[in-house]
Image (cartoon, rainbow, N blue to C red):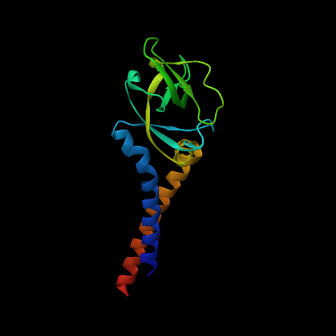
Amino acid sequence: MKAKILSVVATLLMIGLILVALPLTIPKLLGYQIYSVLTASMTPALPVGCAVYVRECDPETLEPGDVVTYYKGAGTTLTETHRVVSNDVESQSLTTKGDANTTQDVYPVRYSQVLGVVAFSIPCLGAVAMGMQSSVGIAVCIVIFALVLLLWTLADKFKKRESFK
């Protein structure tokens, strides 16, 4: 009986770890980039802490209402996700605005800054992903994995003892 309980607990922990990791890995294999929403500028559509899944696009095809992720400026890796207000193909730039903001963004987004269009989002997953990428998050994942291995080992030992009785 102890072996069964330990095995079930270990299996549930491993399934939990895998279920958290799957939406952070499988979409990347399908060509999506994943970003976390850090500010409330796109609420309620994209709340703080959600993960946005971005696919590459041709900026010329973007239309008002599309939500795009882009580099905030030249020479930076900081990104922002806002809604397209207008697309000026001649100047190769977008006018954007956060849904919760009262005014349009001050600077236009050049096509070269555009990372892609948001295909879908998952609430809270961005915060979980950022937590898992921190040193504490990595340590927690390692501890959970080690705990699973320990529980499976103990379950195996208890199973062998129970079979001798």
In the foreground, 17 or 78: 78
Q: Position of residue 108 (x, y in %)?
A: 55, 18
Q: Left of 23 or right of it: where is 96?
A: right
Instruction: Name the residue: 39% across, 37% down.
Output: 32
In the foreground, 113 or 63: 63
Q: Is residue 153 above or below residue 64?
A: below
Residue placed furthest toward the bottom: 165
Q: Position of residue 11 (x, y in %)?
A: 42, 65
Instruction: Name the residue: 55% across, 21% down.
Output: 76
Q: Is residue 96 above or below residue 132?
A: above
Residue placed furthest toward the top: 91
Quarter location, residue 56: top left
Q: Position of residue 77 (x, y in %)?
A: 53, 25
In the foreground, 7 or 23: 23
Instruction: Name the residue: 58% across, 37% down.
Output: 42
Q: How many marks?
A: 0
Q: Position of residue 28 (x, y in %)?
A: 38, 39
Q: Quadrant of the N terminus?
A: bottom left
Q: Is residue 106 above or below residue 165?
A: above
Instruction: Name the residue: 46% across, 24% down.
Output: 114
In the foreground, 107 or 113: 107
Residue placed furthest toward the right: 102
Residue placed furthest toward the left: 30
Q: Quadrant of the C terminus?
A: bottom left
Q: Left of 147 or right of it: where is 49?
A: right
Q: Is residue 5 above or below residue 15?
A: below
